[in-house]
């Protein structure tokens, strides 16, 4: 096994053809692959996501949160015109965007990117020497010494190499081949790209992609854009929103009557649930993927936000590798990483995904037509820099460490605050939080409120959030934005707010909920 810091030699890739993609040549003694799923190149189509202008494209579903955001903007305009309200400002409490909440990207990343965009800053005294040195190294890899060029070779070679070395450090030395790493302009479009490779337009049944409920709305939308069917599977709220293997199998069984399930999405750390999977849970999920012959799509974009020492983040790549044969070489995995959920910012649009046990020939798709191609180069500069952060003797090291540890510390503090305040509120219950940027408390809504919501043509949680907004100026995400177990009601609450703002929001929420219960009892 390759260990970081030792010389690398050119070795042939050991890639399992598996159920997803075209097989590499196999020796007669090699074990047969699992029963084949639709292979790339056999669909008779381009494999591209359907065009938005195509009448056959899947319909776009509306977001339960969007009307609330539009109403919040209208309220802000009313306040600016002097309209009397029981509050003086709108407080948005729903988001997962750290920069919007006031957490700037790490200074070291911004300094390196600024120098690459304007190399004259190499002479600026306000920029530390290690940032100048790192920027100089990157500029030598950029065509014309500028991020203004397409710089595809920088992305596919230099950045991919940096990512691979980072993954080896993260995963305890488990090898990562840069040829199986795809840097991209954020993970949203990349998920559509990957899912589209599973779609066989000529098949009798559409492709199915299992997505968690609750979970990021992105997954279901990506499946639809890729021409697949989103198959929801419920997370186990009573077990802290863990993945329930029996529930996944039941969802698979029901789905096979209407589609061919080919992929299982798992989110770790959970969003919006705040759950971090244990090693045992991850091993169970990997075994399930092997037994059911589905591609494992690991959404691990929140990994830098796992904030409890006794529930650390483990990647599916690491757990799979440490399980050993035969699963380590047969279960196919695509894992996703986003710079915006770590030390960067969403506006820079940078991330990557890694293919495990998948023939790297599939990468030709992404470098030919995929939306992941030609990501913004300044974002890739920041990703490259984040993969090789300052070392202990570098002048930027203390500030960089404080930035990464400080955000986790703030998230942990806010998670405790949420559970302390909501834990005292009748009719509100929040499961333990281990990571991520949101809490997802369950709220009790009385039958009269449910009837009122139905009369208005609204989901009950949307009705609650509308009433909350009008009374307090606070925007929370209704649970139906993420999906929720039938007959239950939740709200999504950001942990990225400043602690004093969050405490005020929590107290206002509990007071409003108590009044709401009295009003509709």
Image (cartoon, rainbow, N blue to C red):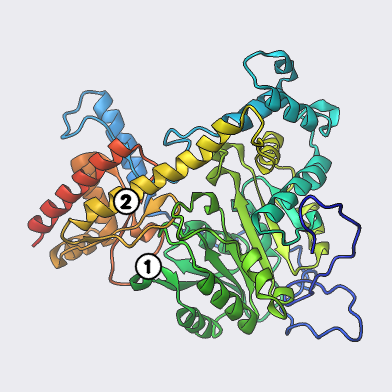
* Cα gap from disc 1 to disc 2, whole angstroms: 15 Å
Q: Which residue appears at 45% of the width and 52% of the height? A: 436
| Disc 1 crowd, CA 10 A, few/some/many (<14, 14-19, 20+) | some
Q: Quadrant of the N terminus?
A: bottom right
Residue at the image point whose x is 63% and y is 52% from the top: 189
Q: Are marks 1 and 2 in contact (CB under 8 Å)?
A: no
| Displayed quadrant of residue 34 | bottom right
- Residue 214 relative to residue 9: left or right: left
- Image position of 509 (left or right of 149): left
Say if residue 499 shows up in the picture. Answer: yes
Q: Nearer the viewer, residue 11 or 169?
A: 169
- Residue 383 at x, y = what percent? 67, 41
* Secondary structure at numbered mark 2: helix
Q: Position of residue 294 (x, y in %)?
A: 63, 76
Residue found at the far front of this picture: 393
Q: Which mark is residue 9?
A: none
Q: Which residue is mark 1?
A: 240
**Residue under numbered circle 2:** 416
Q: Is residue 227 visible?
A: no
Figure check: 303 above or below 362: above
Q: Earlier in the sequence, mark 1 or mark 2?
A: 1
Locate residue 48: give its quadrant.
Answer: bottom right
Residue 399, horizontal then vertical, whole percent = 55, 31
């Amino acid at each position: 096994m390759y260990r970081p810091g030792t010389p690398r030699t050119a070795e042939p890739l050991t890639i399992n053809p598996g159920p997803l993609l075209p097989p590499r040549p196999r020796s007669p003694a090699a074990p047969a692959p699992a029963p084949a799923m639709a292979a790339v190149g056999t669909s008779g189509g381009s494999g591209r996501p359907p065009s938005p202008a195509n009448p056959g494209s899947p319909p776009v579903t509306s977001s339960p949160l969007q009307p609330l955001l539009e109403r919040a903007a209208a309220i802000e305009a009313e306040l600016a015109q002097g309209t009397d309200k029981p509050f003086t400002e709108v407080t948005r409490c729903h988001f997962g965007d750290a920069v919007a909440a006031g957490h700037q990207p790490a200074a070291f990343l911004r300094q390196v990117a600024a120098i690459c965009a304007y190399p004259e800053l190499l002479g600026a005294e306000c920029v530390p020497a290690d940032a100048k040195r790192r920027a100089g190294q990157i500029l030598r890899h950029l065509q014309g010494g500028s991020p203004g060029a397409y710089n595809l070779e920088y992305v596919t070679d230099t950045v991919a190499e940096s990512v691979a070395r980072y993954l080896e450090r993260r995963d305890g030395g488990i090898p990562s081949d840069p040829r199986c790493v795809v840097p991209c302009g954020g993970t949203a479009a990349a998920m559509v790209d990957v899912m589209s490779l599973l779609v066989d337009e000529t098949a009798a049944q559409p492709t199915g992609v299992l997505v968690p409920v609750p979970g990021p709305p992105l997954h279901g939308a990506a499946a639809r854009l890729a021409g697949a069917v989103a198959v929801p599977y419920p997370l186990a709220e009573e077990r802290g929103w863990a993945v329930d293997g029996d529930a996944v199998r039941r969802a698979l069984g029901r789905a096979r009557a209407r589609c061919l399930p080919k992929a299982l999405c798992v989110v770790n750390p959970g969003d919006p649930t705040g759950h971090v999977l244990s090693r045992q849970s991850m091993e169970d999920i990997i075994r399930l993927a092997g037994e059911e012959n589905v591609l494992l799509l690991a959404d691990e974009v929140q990994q830098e936000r796992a904030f409890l020492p006794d529930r650390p983040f483990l990647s599916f790549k690491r757990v799979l590798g440490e399980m050993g044969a035969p699963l380590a070489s047969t279960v196919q995995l695509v894992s996703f990483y986003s710079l915006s959920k770590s030390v960067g910012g969403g506006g820079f649009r940078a991330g990557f995904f890694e293919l495990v046990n998948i023939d790297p020939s599939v990468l030709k798709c992404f470098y030919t037509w995929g939306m992941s191609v030609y990501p913004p180069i300044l974002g890739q500069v920041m990703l490259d820099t984040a993969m090789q952060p300052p070392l202990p003797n570098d002048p930027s090291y203390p500030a960089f460490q404080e930035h990464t540890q400080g955000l986790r510390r703030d998230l942990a503090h806010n998670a405790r605050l949420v559970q302390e305040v909501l834990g005292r509120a009748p009719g509100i219950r929040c499961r333990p939080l281990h990571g991520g940027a949101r809490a997802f408390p369950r709220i009790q809504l009385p039958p009269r409120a449910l009837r009122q919501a139905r009369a208005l043509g609204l989901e009950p949680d949307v009705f609650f959030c509308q009433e909350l907004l009008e009374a307090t100026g606070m925007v929370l995400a209704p649970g139906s934005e993420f999906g929720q177990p039938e007959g239950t009601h939740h709200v999504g609450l950001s942990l990225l707010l400043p602690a004093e703002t969050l405490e005020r929001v929590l107290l206002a929420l509990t007071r409003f909920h108590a009044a709401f219960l009295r009003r509709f009892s």
